[in-house]
Amino acid sequence: MKRLILLLLVMLLSVTVSAQDAPLKVVATTTIIADVARNVGGDLVEVTSLVPPDADTHAFQPSPEDAVRVSEADVLLVNGVGLEVFLGELVEIVGTVEPLVVSNGIEMLALGEHHHDEEEHKGEEAHEEGEIVGVLGDEGVCEEAHHDEPEATEEAHEDEHEHGSCDPHVWTDPHNMIVWTGNIADAFAAADPANADTYRANAAAYVEQLEALDTEVAEILSVIPAERRILVTNHEFLAYFAHRYEFEVVGVVITGGTTLAEPDPQELADLIALVEAEGVPAIFAEVSSTADLAEVVAAETGINVVTTLYSESLSDANDPAATYLDYLRYNAQTIAEALSD
């Protein structure tokens, strides 16, 4: 019944939306993907994001208007790896565009490799050798994380809080964004061959900005001594950042790679013990989700909760993470300030 109602609303709303010849209509699932797409497409594309700024992707529910946007898209850009649990039924209903997984080609990290339920946290050697599970798009890599695909089963949707064996939060490493940029340029060139050279030139210019950002972020973080490069986060979203910039995520408040799960009291007790044993300086939470459980851990351990990181979404234009470049720079500065004292 829910699917029938949504389909009827899509049909009704579609009548009121007039077709446009140009620019290329692009729908991205998140504001971060949308920002990269705008850099690649420039004036040749019209990009909208399903998930709004300052929002929690894990909790997002699409509207009938979103279904209309997807139905009219020339290109649909998705992160993949099970992040967009809301997308499967939506794409199945509208059935007009095949999602382009922008993360294909990225070396994937295992989800939860450094959770606080391990017997002992692993050192740098394990961090380098134990987390990469393969390249997304290769056969058998991350195949469990398919809940955003149209053919996903009802059982998979009911189990929507599981991302499979891979961590989907790839964008916290700017080198992964270079992969996104190339994939998006290829998608735009395929949809609009007449402007392929422009898309690829724009992509090359943006890659230069990403490489410069990587150098800048490393410099920002250089003030943090090695012994303080340990992270506890509200939910697991900084693994790729940690892998790139030589941190270790020793624990998370909400396990499983989503903000929607709730740990049991024993998990919180274990995390409190780990924070005390490791001398963790701060817990990092996000502006888009509640920090209540992180506050409990902080109160028990006497450390600070930094609640101003951005995770799955950019900020609006008036706040400090309105673009991806601003997003990563801001998060790095916030982490450096909290851990270098």
Image (tube, rainbow, N blue to C red):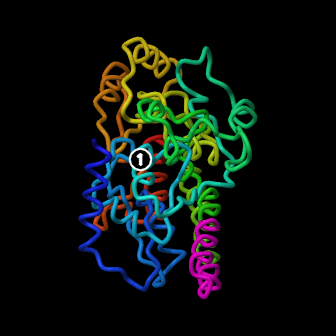
Query: Would residue 138 appear left or right of 4 to someone viewing this image?
Result: right
Which range of residues does the magenta coloring cover? 181-202
**Residue 75 point in image, percent of width and height:** 50, 68
Q: How many marks?
A: 1
**Residue 277 point in image, percent of width and height:** 51, 17
Q: Residue at x 63, y 65 (%)?
A: 183
Q: Residue at x 51, y 78 (%)?
A: 41
Up-down: is 143 above or below 22?
above
Q: Badge 1: how crowded within 10 Å, few (<14), some, or many (20+)?
A: many
**Viewer-side residue, 321 vs 169:** 169
**Residue 283 point in image, percent of width and height:** 41, 33
Up-down: is 165 above or below 301?
below
Q: Quadrant of the N terminus?
A: top left
**Viewer-side residue, 172 vs 278:** 172
Which residue is the extreme one toward the top?
266
Element carrying mark 1? helix
Query: Would residue 59 appear left or right of 203 to someone viewing this image?
Result: left
Which amino acid, by three-letter code, is at mark 1? Answer: Glu
Disc 1 target residue: 89
Query: Would residue 337 appear left or right of 304 to someone viewing this image?
Result: right
Which residue is the extreme one toward the bottom?
194
Up-down: is 298 above or below 239?
above
Residue 180 in sight: yes
Residue 121 drawn in magenta: no
Magenta stretch: dominant secondary structure: helix
Q: Quadrant of the C terminus?
A: top left
Q: Quadrant of residue 128?
A: top right
Residue 197 drawn in magenta: yes
**Residue 130 point in image, percent of width and height:** 72, 32
